[in-house]
Image: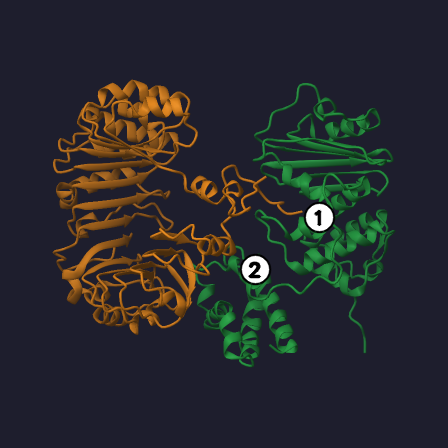
Chain colours: A orange, B green
Amino acid sequence: MPPIASSNRGKIDPLSRAVLARAIDEGVLDECRSLGSFRCPLRLPRALSDLWLSQAVLSRELLAHDSLRTLRVPAIVASAPLRHDALTRFETACIGPGLDLLESAEFPRLEGLRLERIGLGPTPAARVAAALERLRARGLTLGIAGRVGDVGWTVEDMRALRPFAERIEGLTLESPFAPIDFDMPNLRRLVAHVRSRGPMLDRFDWPDLPSVDELHVFTTFHNIDFAALVRTFHASKLARRLRVLHWEFSATAMQGLADHPMEALEELSLLANDSQRGALAANAILERGRFPRLRAMTLRSVQQIAGLAASPLAAQIERLSVPLSPGKWLDDWTAVRPRLTSLKTLIVQRPARLTPEQRVAIADGVPQVIWGENSARAVRRYFHADRGIATFGANQ
Amino acid sequence: MAASTLEEIREHAESLRRWGTNNLSHQSHYAPYARQAAPKLLDAARRLAPDERLALSELLGWCDAIVAGWVFEHGFDPSELSELIDEVLPPLAEAEPDPPSSFETATAEHAVGMTVLHALSLLTAGFSNTDPFRLSGTLKRGSYAFSDQSESNFAVCWDKSGVVAVAFHKYGERLDGGIATALPGLPTELAPLAARIATMMGEWCTVGLWITRDGRRGRLQGHGEDDGSSYLEALTSTPREALFGRPRGGLEFARERGELARSLALRILSGGGAISDEESSQLVDGTTTPADLRKTATLLRSFGLRWPEVSTMDSRTGRPPRKRR
């Protein structure tokens, strides 16, 4: 009898639209400004300004919601004509009807537009350019899929973006990176997905990438020569100017990131997956890395706390985001805490299992502590039967 | 809304539901059902009044997307369709509602029937009686074990004295004193059933219940989360509540399959009978191999359900012979 398939610990059944609608009707969400949902809600809280839908059929009613300012829908299944007088930010992807809808969209106040998955399917450069021309958003963030075989954008396709170069603020690229032969003076953020599509990937296009302040690199795929990846990264002009670097990885060879100093780096995220290899690499980077201006750091796995304890960087960190959970890792934290002499803001990830006493001990002496709440638990807290609103979530 | 139009829309929507609930990695062989049904549903919807169409607008949006073909691209997930269809096309009123049932009122016979229903719901969904469940015996004496292959397990044993059921989660702890001592107030006549469960799945138990044939009962309650209690709650609830009335975990039950399982379970409880041709075709649709069919038929026979059509089925394809005109 259902449930028969699984009962993952921590898993929570999605909040039903009927329950959400009831919560809205009862005024529980009157102050709600931001809402994320897998599907389009039946009703929207009246003050809602930021709506993030994973996938949706966009109705006229939704697009008529006066207070809406930001709408993010990566997958539009179908939609009424995109028209909103006050929307300032819109995010979608060039899949399904996305591009068709953008070509006739009317968002007169649009300031920011994010368009992902360009080149993944049939997205002619001229049509993308026409849509960007029509929507006068000042800031553009574009995601361009890597070219595989005959599918994907070429150098010529990329040139169609030249007229908008000054408006481009963010780029997401997948390897092999589409070559860009024009300047983007306002480009601030670059997201690079490095992936092998079969054979071992040992050539990297770092030199072809534009210089930016902020770089996010995702290298969680196999068949990548990580040592060469890091070596060529350090040799590129991109690495020298970076102020913010987020790197997600799981390979030991990533410790090469500590081989050369990064003089301008102010913020570093070492997003090692929960694997021994990733943690080893992250700890080696923490131990040997030379980042004289580094002030902010994010660590992803609890194994990295030991690395932070041994790191000379500990004394210069002012803002730290770190996962803390009871057990051995908390002892590691106790060891490293006295060395964080400059710490001003601590963001604790996964704090759910910490006792009040442990929370007090962690917060002691830190000017500002932010407890990062697990979203499933937050949903359960706010919509659980105890609150008299809903009875969902009776997980086994 | 004209009743015939509504019925037509409902019928096509069920095909969409089939695709939505069986879409795995976007390589589903159920996609043709959706491709055929979507344009028909759109055609039927054209006969509706504007406000009626408005009520179905999200479903019609999905149909447009299916006709355009882009929802079959990577990036779209149709698993929400089942919930959407339930919302915009609520199920028809039940002709014969289930009488209320709870732990306090359920009989041992009811718990056994619900156990058989669990097995039937899996059989109609295409699982065979080896994995992930095993049902054996008759209504008078039998056993049932289920594992979700990942985290949760439960087992039920019954005989002329009553029924004992336990469930545990992989994060549960092995019992030192055995299942019999963990179940509060377990009568001595039910102790052999607890021992049988232990031989099936070991001395593991995070929740449990027992009911004697003369109506005494008791249970071991868990901590409310990750303890398998929803399995045991289902054993004493009504069939439809158990099938459709709660968060359903990873496997979404199509209404028609659930109703088939329910009607077979009720038939077993009322003394058995034959499986009709229509029911047979639904069962065959859910079963994978001829060997499975024969095993299923044997199993159902031990619980009083005859399946005449199986004996005439093609041993290679498992399909009924084509009727000659």
- Residue at 14% over, 55% down: A186
Expressed as whole percent of the image width and height from the top left, the position of residue B112 reads: 78, 42
> Quick one: label 1, few (<14), some, or many (20+) residues within 10 Å?
many
Expressed as whole percent of the image width and height from the top left, the position of residue A116 reads: 31, 59
Dot 2: what SS?
helix
In the image, taking residue B55 as reference, residue A297 lies left or right, namely left
Q: Is residue B62 above or below residue A44?
A: below
Q: Earlier in the sequence, mark 1 or mark 2?
A: 2
Q: Disc 1 versus disc 2: distance between alpha carbons? A: 24 Å
Task: Name which residue type carries label 1.
Answer: Ser
Expressed as whole percent of the image width and height from the top left, the position of residue B42 reads: 53, 76
Expressed as whole percent of the image width and height from the top left, the position of residue B321 reads: 79, 67
Q: Residue furthest front?
A: A26
Whether residue B29 is visible here, answered yes or no, is no
- Residue at 34% over, 52% down: A34
Q: Is residue A295 above or below residue A361?
A: below
| Among the 4 quarters of the image, the one containing residue A236 | top left
A150 and B286: which is toward the camera: B286
Instruction: Name the quarter where the C terminus of chain A is drawn.
Output: top right
In the image, taking residue B182 as reference, residue A215 lies left or right, namely left
Which label sits on residue B82? Answer: 2
Task: Name which residue type carries label 2.
Answer: Ser
Which label sits on residue B128? Answer: 1
A389 and A18: which is toward the camera: A389
> Quick one: label 2, few (<14), some, or many (20+) residues within 10 Å?
many
A67 and A355: which is toward the camera: A67
